[in-house]
Amino acid sequence: MDKRAAILLVLSLPVCAATCEDLKSLSLADTTIDTAESIAAGAFKPAAAANAKQAPNFSDLPAFCRVAGTIKPTADSDIKIEVWMPAKGWNGKLEGNGNGGWTGSITPATLATGLRRNYATAMTDTGHEGGSGSFALGHPEKLIDFAYRSTHVMTVAAKQIVTAFYGRAPGLSYFNGCSAGGKQGLAEAQLFPTDYQGIISGAAANNWTHMMAQIVWVAQAVHKDNASFIPANKLPQLHDSAVAACDARDGVKDGVIDDPTKCKFDPKVIECKGKDTPACLTSAQVEAARKIYSPVRNPRTKQEIYPGFEPGSELGWSQFVAGPTPTTFATDEFKFVVFKNPDWDYKTMNFDGDVALADIADGKINNATDPNLKTFFEHGGKLIQYHGWNDQLIAPMNSVNYYLSVEKAMAEEGKAAEAEKAEPPRFENDKGGKAAKERTAPPPSEALANVTNSYRLFMAPGMNHCQGGDGPSNFDMLTALEQWVESGAAPDRVVASHMTSGKVDRTRPLCPYPQVAVFNGKGSTDDAQNFTCRVR
């Protein structure tokens, strides 16, 4: 029986177990079940939204069992989780979901998305409430909960809850997250490689402390003095100039830069020749913009700390550039984790020593940068990572750098294995037999192939942070992951669409890095079928 047939057999087994309400008395380690309730089709009513007009509509939801619990792996832990399970038509799978930023909340809309696909779906508040990092001050265990522990214990508990409800464990488990959720996915692959068979990691904030340093770097650049500040009304002109300089390089003039790393744009081209207007940048603003595009570097060693934003991302800069102070998203890391001083001033940040201090103070628990994914790969795990080239919050080259670090780690492991095989026998009776057979690390070429067979990175031209932007940014990575895990069909391209006023006006393939979508020369450039993925 092949792998897919075995999976389908498991997923088709009859469902029989406890009622939803019975789960209230379920006994799990370190866990209290606070709520276990059956929700009728279309009857779910979330807490009142701040803006009723923007509240999501849940009237289409099927009947489901909603379980809410609290997990306390340490005396200072208070991790909330929710698990939603279809009353009928369960697909036999679990989807764990990620969070964003410092967010301490469980979002019903996220859980509902998985439920609509017949998944049992789970989410955690990461162990605290609210969107501030202030919870970490004086609470090191809560910081660990936020960084990675809450996701793992949620996953373990969710599997047990699902098993109790349906009478069988999930046949497959997938994780899906973007931003801090993307970091959660990578942390799962690195620290708990058997939790999930497949992981989607979007725009991962995995180099956490260095990313926060980059945001402070940008703030220092635009607030160096009054002359350096770039007002929001100048960003559209800067964006248009960057697109004009880089757009047609790929042979298709469509208002989107396919790979900004291949086009060098200097904001000096719109430096004011005379009067300061919204259509130009002053010389001080040009220098500030250059710093935003450039990598953060240690001023003494010149070593890169974190990449800069790419040409094309300018319309999103207002969050960091056009405000009077940097976002608390970044400064909270230094106030409450690194310096433990709520009055810390971002202007005092020293990029020679403070970034290293941040890594030490954080204990690197928030940095999911370990390139060793060997156990996850050997477990059969598949990882899809994606990132928008126009990301205005997390520099897109961060994802490329992590992908390359995994390739490098696998290649070095392969080289070490080859060198070991070339050594003479270590023992008199070892003629290359038993000892040689016990050497399991693959050669370099095979090691790199293992990366491709288990890990794909998709860079999305024109996409902002996690979604939106000038380029096609609507895509279904979960289906691509399902087909890879369940059918062995590796994602050689994922079609993305762009919408205007609710209507699709462009489709384009996203290609596994380092490939890009190349126009075939015939047909509409708004149709994905007229593009081929290849290395340019």
Image (cartoon, helix red, strand yellow):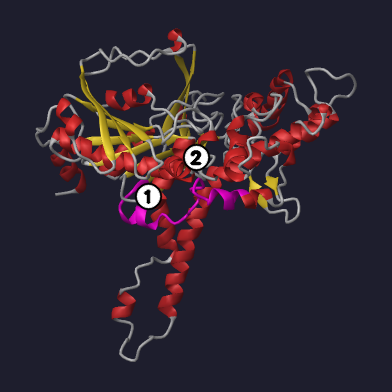
Where's residue 48, x and y in %? 39, 12
Residue 378 sits inside the magenta stretch? yes
As displayed, is residue 357 above or below residue 66?
below
Residue 220 higher or lower than 421, as above or below:
above
| SS at badge 2 | loop
Q: In the figure, residue 184 lies in which quadrant?
A: top left
Q: Which residues are magenta?
A: 358-382
Residue 110 horizontal side relative to residue 170, left or right: right
Q: From where the camera sits, is residue 178 visible?
A: yes
Vertical side of 179 occupied by 379: above or below: below
Nearer to us in this view, 489 or 15:
15
- The residue identified by callout 2 is 204
Q: Quadrant of residue 83?
A: top left
Q: Residue at x 33, y 49 (%)?
A: 381
Label 2 sits on what residue type? Ala
Q: Please indicate, yes or no, whether residue 268 appears anywhere in the rendered image.
A: no
From the viewer's perspective, tell me whether residue 512 is left or right of residue 462. Answer: left
The residue located at (71%, 42%) in the rendering is 349
Crowding at dot 2, Cα within 10 Å, few <14 / some 14-19 / many 20+, comes out as: many
Q: CA distance from mark 2 to mark 1?
A: 18 Å
Q: Is residue 418 magenta?
A: no
| Disc 1: which residue | 454
Closer to the chain start, of discs 2 and 1, is 2
Q: Residue 111 sits in which quadrant?
A: top left
| Horizontal relation, residue 69 to residue 448: left or right | left
Assign a secondary structure to mark 1: helix
Identity, as a three-letter code, of the amino acid under mark 1: Ser
